[in-house]
Image (cartoon, grey):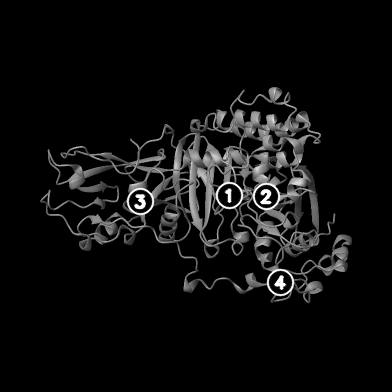
Amino acid sequence: MRNLWVAIATIALASFAAAPALACGGFFCGGTPIDQTGEDILFAVDGRNIEAHVRIAYSGEAESFSWVVPVPGVPELEVGTDELFTQLGASTAPSWNLEVGDAKCDWPYVYGGWGKDEADADGGGPNPGNSGPPSVEVLAEISVGAYEAVVLSAQNAQALLDWLNCNEYRIASSALPRVQAYIDGNMNFLGLKLRDGAGTGELTPIVMRYVAPQPVIPLVLTAVAVQPNLRIRAYFLGDNRAVPTNYDHVWLNDSRVDWMNGNWWAGPWAPQSYEALITAAVDEAGGKAFVTDYAGSSSLMANRIFREGGYDTDLLRTFTNPAEFVQQALWMGLPRNAVMQGLLRTHIPMPQDLIDQGVEERDFYNNLGGYQQYLSELNFDPNAFVDDLVELLLDPMESAQELFDSSDYSWLSRLQTTISGWEMNADPAFTFLDTVIDPEAGQVTDFPHQGAVSTQRWAVQDFIGGEPGVSCWSAAAVVNTLSGVQPVLQFPNESKVAIDFPTQADMPLCTELPAAMVVERFNEAGTMGVIADHRAAILAAAPNGYCMPAVEAPAPVEPPPESDWPPLQDMLPLQEMTEEYCEQLESGSTPLNDDPNVATDPITGAPAACSGCAGSLAGGSSSLLGLLLMGGLRRRRR
């Protein structure tokens, strides 16, 4: 089994905004909506050196938070920034735009836009399999930001699960075979918890640096824990365009695109129709495939995350009045995110009198000047605030920006998919094409396509039946797509334009056509080929060449009947670890240590020592990827 694994992406934090009372202009305002329906990760790849930025998704109590993920070796850890994913998401979101073709009618109106396999020697040591002592070794304990991190090595999956459960990482016995597969692949495990006193508002992305042959997203371990049709968005920085190697690559049927609203259809404010189309196309391709939203120059991100000289922290230190300090921070354009909100709570705590009066947090922090009399006794230290601001917000932002300023990473790629647990039987791996191509984004017109992929997708809108002196409002408006089928945006006005044009009843809905237009396959060497071209089938489904636009239906959330999902073992409860057993585990006197091949219960998968234990899943909830787990045991052991 390859030792290629990498930590996995996650999503943004929950909003802290309370009920609105003021015209919002402060740090507790909503900006770009936070996407809490998917997972995000950035890989920066330089040869075998990989830097992964991971957004952690979690909703629940802070004391119940824990996160475990397989990793190669002992990665270097660092605090990341949400601003990286906020700016990446906005900069690389695709849009679909129309330009007017050869229109003969007067004043053509354009719909849509505003214009134009070997084990890795560096991974984790030799593969012990199930032979030898099933001990758990703590390779590193690290404090990073609001997290306490531990890196573990194990030779036996049951011993590792027992250790994690004894140390407040609540993992069901059903994870046993998946964990063992990663152990067999020479993987270690990274665990994160919030330090004592930290809240979920301090959850920030985590940065990991390690050595591996290629970036991989571990999905198999948490197949049951994720929601159906989980959106995964993976960004790649490298010397060429990134592509999947063991998942297929799909081009969407562009006649199903919402061309009427194409300039915002896939943006952060849009409904989920774009993801529904991705889901339909990926399912048609077998359930394991990605689409490319963008592939081109990384210069797209110049000065997007951090502006050199843009934040005058020396000036900020001179403001001893909390209200004036916050106003100056707003004028500087500091991000309105959870980190900044946490700093405000720490350094300008809301007076208890106002809390007792029922004043909302958002009202207080967005209007500090209106509560001056309550701030007179606050011992506000602007230097301490700025020190934390630099460490927890500005330094991670500057570090993230440096990735896009580096000559090592000329290309930026954004790949996206949706996937359900019953489809997660392989971890997607990625590589970079070896053909040297100008990374400046271009238009995709043929397949297979190895070049750049622009965020701006263009199609020609024709006005059929128009003539001089007749308004284009009266002509038929259609879109010329790569699939060959023309969505009809406007039917002709029969009283003004006499043309033979099909009626709505004579054409199918665009959403009834196949969702996947072309399916490509890459290998680890970066070569590729077309394995399925559905354009003929798309044309056959629309005999007269036209279709009627319709809203994409929500993606199905139930597994296919033949999938036999979920497997029996994945429905098992957590094992409650007794005090006595955990002490035995630490002292090395459990049956596992006496016999590495000890028989396990055939139903629970637990060792004989715990086969009679009972328990149930406890703790918060989350969109889980990698292995994000939480539980109720509050006793910490080392």
Q: Secondary structure at mark 3?
A: loop
Kind of residue at disc 4: Gly
Helix, strand or loop status at disc 2? strand
Q: Quadrant of the image for the N terminus? A: bottom right
Residue marked by disc 2 = 71
Q: Position of residue 48 (x, y in %)?
A: 61, 40
Mark 4 or 2, nearer chain start: 2
Residue in the image at 85% along x and 56% along y: 637
**Callout in the foreground (1, 3):** 3
Among the 4 quarters of the image, the one containing residue 313? top right
**What's the CA distance linking mark 1 and mark 2?**
10 Å
The quadrant holding residue 370 is top right
Q: Is residue 205 visible?
A: no
Judged from the image, the secondary structure of the residue bearing numbered disc 1 is loop
> Compared to 240, does 320 lie above or below?
above
Check disc 3 and report the residue beneath it.
257
Q: Which residue is mark 1?
A: 216
Q: Nearer the viewer, residue 200 or 186?
A: 200
Pointer 1 local density, CA inside 10 Å: few below 14, some 14–19, many at least 20:
many
Mark carried by residue 605: 4
Q: Is 215 positioned to the left or the right of 131 in the image? A: left
First along the sequence among labels 1 and 3: 1
